[in-house]
Amino acid sequence: MMKKMKRLWALVLSVVVFASTLAGCGQGKKEATKDKNIVKILNNKESLCLAPVHIAIINGYFDEEFAAIGQEYEIVTSNLDTITEQITSGEINAGYGLTGTLMQPIANGLEIAYVTGLHRGCTKFYSKNGTGIDSLEDLKGKTVGVASLSDSAIIQLKRKLYRLGFKVNGSDADIQFVTYAMTDLPTALDKGAVDAIGIHDPVAYTAEKNYDFKKIFDIGVDPDFAEEYCCQAYVSQDLIAKNPEGAAAYARAIQKAAAFVQANPQEAARLQVANGYMPSESDEDIVKYGEILAGLNYEPSIKLGRETFVSTFRDLQETGDLDSSLNLEEFTKKVYPTLENVPETIIYDKESNTFKEKEKGCCGD
């Protein structure tokens, strides 16, 4: 009798252990699936141009869009200079970056896909008054200071100078580049260490106010570049392949936020400061931030964003910065695909506090 009872208890125990193992496996699978569907969004504090990311968090646009599809998102606060490594490692799968800066990494295999253009006009070039450098043509044989040799300022200037007949690459190039920290570039120009500088807002805005500089090139008003997006939103190609709904939710939320900034630059600046995304010592800082945002065009567009990519890619093949054998059409399909349920653009109406979509489902075709 005792032997039968022992066998019975052993059987019961084995069933319990087996059931627990199944439950554990099921729970692990559920968590793994859940983790796969978490969209990891890059954020960076004290970066004014990232206003759409900040506003999408503050105003709840990420909350709305991801709740609508039953998914979650995670904000990953990090350094914008490490996005290549973070995308590759999977630490982030959605972000925001300078089109020009990302062109060579994309050509070299960085697997991201743009989802919408976000804003235009944040890069400007200055010389110092009285130096005889009054236009881009005067830069022949000169040295230009930039934040890094991969910075989009170099890309934009090379494209423009190439159209003006400059030789922009090689040992006999008509122009040379040297690097300084972004915030040190105005001082370098003021002291004569360089002949011109290429900088981004808000550093450009401050430099223009505080130094005796002459603006010789502004991509926001230049006829060749005024319609191009200096900054665009992107996702990893892996996210599009495995979770296209999540990629589309990110695109819609970031479009809404950009449209809000376009309609309310001063309020957007106030919200950034109030929520700790931008530093401020006084109300004057908020006014300054608002003026900078108002000077940029934050109306999102997939069509113009794609055209920016195509134009930049083609120009860099001509300058020799990208391999001329790369197939532009194939890269465009891969790097600027059509996402379902993402509008061409979104406009925010302040009076009704509503968004209006235009050409839904049309992505520049």
Image (cartoon, grey):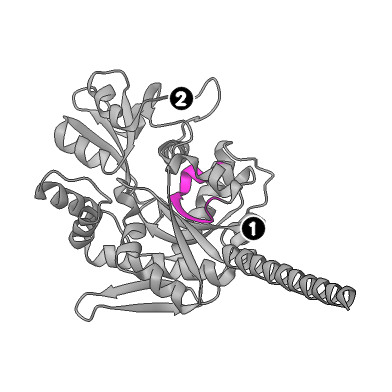
Could you tell me which residue is drawn at 50 percent across and 45 percent down? Answer: 83
Secondary structure found at label 2: loop
Quarter occupied by residue 152: top left
Q: Examine the structure image and report whether residue 92 is included in the region drawn in magenta.
A: yes
Q: Position of residue 258 (x, y in %)?
A: 34, 63
Quarter occupied by residue 339: bottom right
Circle 2 packing at 10 Å, graded few (<14), some (14-19), many (20+), is some
Which stretch did the figure color magenta? Answer: 91-104
Vertical placement of residue 288 versus 8, above or below: above
Q: Which mark's residue is nearer the viewer, 2 or 1?
A: 1
Q: Position of residue 3 (x, y in %)?
A: 89, 73
Is 262 or 129 nearer to us in this picture?
A: 262
Vertical placement of residue 15 versus 258, above or below: below
> Which mark sits nearer the N-terminus, 2 or 1?
2
On the rendered image, what quadrant is the C terminus found in? bottom right
Could you tell me which residue is drawn at 36 percent across and 27 percent down? Answer: 145
Vertical placement of residue 166 versus 191, above or below: below
Q: How far apart are the two marked residues, 2 and 1, measured between alpha carbons?
A: 31 Å
Tag 1: residue type? Glu
Q: What numbered label is drawn on residue 174?
A: 2
Q: Could you tell whether 156 is left or right of 260 in the image?
A: right
Q: Examine the structure image and report whether residue 97 is included in the region drawn in magenta.
A: yes
The residue singled out by tag 1 in the image is 329
Q: Could you tell whether 56 is left or right of 320 in the image?
A: left
Secondary structure found at label 1: helix
On the rendered image, what quadrant is the N terminus found in? bottom right
